[in-house]
Image (tube, grey):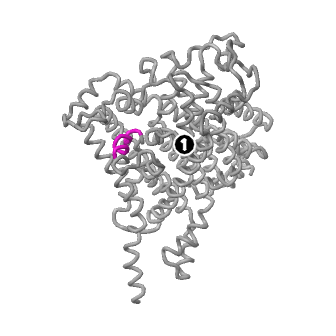
Amino acid sequence: MKLHTGLVLNKVTLLILLGFCSFIVLLPIIWMIIFSFGETSKNSGLLSLIPQNISLKGYIQVFKTTPFLRWLQNSLFVAVVQTFLQVFIGFFAAYAFTRLKFPGRTILFYFVLATMVIPTQALMIPTFVTINFFNMINTFAGVIVPYIASGYAIFLLRQYFMGVPQALVDAARVDGCGELRTMWHIYFPVSLPSIGALAIILFVSHWNEYYWPLLVLTDEKIMTLPIALVRFRNEGIIEWMPTLAASTMATLPVILLFILTQKSFVEGFTSSGIKG
Amino acid sequence: MTSLKKQVSLNWLLPFLFLAPAFILYAVFFIVPVFYAGFLSFAQWNLISPNIEFIGLENYKNLFEDSIFWISLWNTCIYAVATVFPSMAIGILLAVFIEASGKSKSFFRTVFFMPVVASIAVTALVWMLLMSPNNGYINSVLKIFGIKGPNWLNDPQWAMLSIIFVGVWRTSCYNMVLYIAGLKGLDRQLFESAKIDGAGPVKSFLYITFPLLGPVNLFVLVVSLIQSFQVFTTINIMTHGGPNNATNVLVYQVWQEAFQFFDIGRSSAAAIVMFFLVLAVAIFQIHLIERNEKHSD
């Protein structure tokens, strides 16, 4: 698409500029991957420009001393289940907010927006007490259930739904479709790419979720990756080799997922997401 | 006719059925906690003891007399403003440049979204290493140019700036995708005709692209302001709110009071203050968006 070629004075300059920016943007991630294969030497250690020795010591330490694969499984389970439930519950709520008329619609929608605004940390203590009341400490349910109703999912799904052409809906009406069938045959397929994109965004954010799991999951066997990463920082001393190795292994799956789905991700985000 | 009537009566129930699962969960895990947080802000409790003592407005009084509270409130605003606007500007420029880069477009999109995909905890750890004072990567590079780099995270003058830098680094990339989405929605013909009329690239950006992106700008502003009011992970990992509270923000204070000092009452009072602050900003922004939607109708 040559949408904004007008703005470009010179393509080569542009590519050099973008290349330079990419380098700055990617520096920490590339650095992390390279140095996860590095070895600490006494003098300059990890903090030199290039690693002194290439070694797998960090990775070996991770697999020898920790149930890393178990953590990987836990992270995957929590992220997949939470994402699915958020999209499923959000789908119905967003449909009601977009298509159906009922008293209190605006106020309830403001309420949903308000839930997005409240920082999770601010409600952490009462939520923790609630989880404790339901005996959900140290369970995956304790991590997942409090955040199934997602304002973010409802808000974005509503945005997508508002982009569904009215003509399609009218046609379905003429054909005698009720709400459920309109939802299933029109709204679901039309917004499917966007829903996929939303699911990827949600998945990645749950995969990376840190503070809530840290409070709920204290049993080593049930931990998710991000909270397990800090276990290499015991007693105030940070062991950088296993930390970087584990961080790299925790990061690569989501980066890979993103690269593979990049196209549908951005397309979904763009096709009906933000239209104003 | 009777079947139509039946459908109408069913339709009346439908929205509530659709909303029930979400709102039952909201009731248990949002509304109850909000009121409970409100209640706790009037109480004295250490999280473990079975006794919760009601002490009225005492927590608020203490909080407002505490200079650290005002420092963290100020820092929260500084961080928000200094992060949101630069990352909106960088985000929009990146989006325009990337969309103009032809075949390499999808490559650059992927590259620039990496910081958002990687977890904040991981990237905060890595930035912390890069910013190490003596032999960190950044200061080593500066040394080559004969510059002695500061102690980025431990110097009160630089600590907040370093945190803001990491925030801008991540938020710009996030905004870039939102702006690419917005650009796609614009009418191509406008640019063609502007070109025919002899409008240069800068002019067509200023007079066509930017104004047309109005609604997107608002959306990006909402999302990134709300996100930056909640900044926590980078601060918790990189500076612990220091040095000397130079990077202490409201959310961090809430956390600190609760889990380091076990003063649940004070923590809840700070949380309630933050709640109203953020809510006020959000309502103002939603109001702007609604007005915008009415305009475009």
Q: Which residue is mark 1?
A: A224
Residue kind at label 1, given as amino acid type: Thr
Q: Quadrant of the rendered structure where residue B19 is?
A: bottom left
Give the left or right position of residue B60, taking residue A50 as reference: left
Q: Dot 1 lies on which element?
A: loop
The image shows residue B289, relative to residue B57, as above or below, that is: below
Does the segment drawn in magenta span residue A125?
A: yes
The overriding secondary structure of the stretch rendered in magenta is helix
Q: Nearer the viewer, residue B116 or A233?
A: A233
Q: Nearer the viewer, residue A261 or B180?
A: A261
Residue at 46% x, 18% y is B243
Give the left or right position of residue B203, taking residue A203 as reference: right
Does the segment drawn in magenta span residue A193?
A: no
Residue lying at the far front in this picture: please name it: A64
The image shows residue B234, relative to residue A7, as above or below, that is: above
Q: Nearer the viewer, residue A173 or B265?
A: B265
Q: Nearer the viewer, residue A67 or B224?
A: A67
Spot occupied by residue A274 in the image (x, y as percentages of width and height):
56, 53
Q: Looking at the rendering, in which quadrant would you find the N terminus of chain B?
A: bottom left
**Start and end of the magenta stretch?**
A121-129
Spot occupied by residue A86 in the image (x, y as percentages of width and height):
50, 56
